[in-house]
């Protein structure tokens, strides 16, 4: 959670000084988050040159 510009942990954790952490920003709208999170994977599956060889089947 962010309060006054600082990130606060929801649960206590003992982290050593200088440890690197990964922060994921979650919007209030969960549906929007999952749509954006999955877009990269969907693009990789649906938008690739290898599938262009099947384009002629879509025109039949």
Image (cartoon, grey):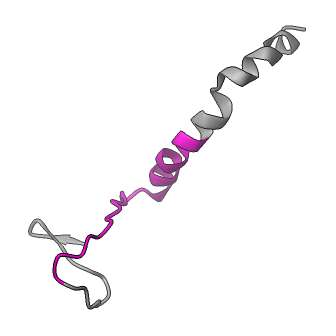
In this picture, is 42 found above or below 14? above
User: Which residue shows up at 87% across the image and 14% down it?
Assistant: 57
In this rendering, would 33 be left or right of 59?
Answer: left
- The picture places residue 55, in percent across and down from the top left corner, at 79, 13
In this rendering, would 9 be left or right of 51?
Answer: left
Find the magenta span and give its range: 17-41
User: Which residue shows up at 60% across the image and 35% down it?
Assistant: 44
- The picture places residue 50, in percent across and down from the top left corner, at 72, 23
Position of the C terminus by quadrant: top right
Please tell me which residue lies in front, 48 or 7: 48
In this picture, is 51 found above or below 20? above
Based on the picture, tell me whether residue 22 belongs to the magenta stretch: yes
Please tell me which residue lies in front, 23 or 34: 23
User: Which residue shows up at 26% across the image and 70% down it?
Assistant: 20
In this rendering, would 25 be left or right of 5?
Answer: right
User: Which residue shows up at 58% across the image and 34% down it?
Assistant: 43
- Considering every residue shown, the one lying at the far right of the view is 60
Image quadrant where residue 59 sits: top right
């Amino acid at each position: 959670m962010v309060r006054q510009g600082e990130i606060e942990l929801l649960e206590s954790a003992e982290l050593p000084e200088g440890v690197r952490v990964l922060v994921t920003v979650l919007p209030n709208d969960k549906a929007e988050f999952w749509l954006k999170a999955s877009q990269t994977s969907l693009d990789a599956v649906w938008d690739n040159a290898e599938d262009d060889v099947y384009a002629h089947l879509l025109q039949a």
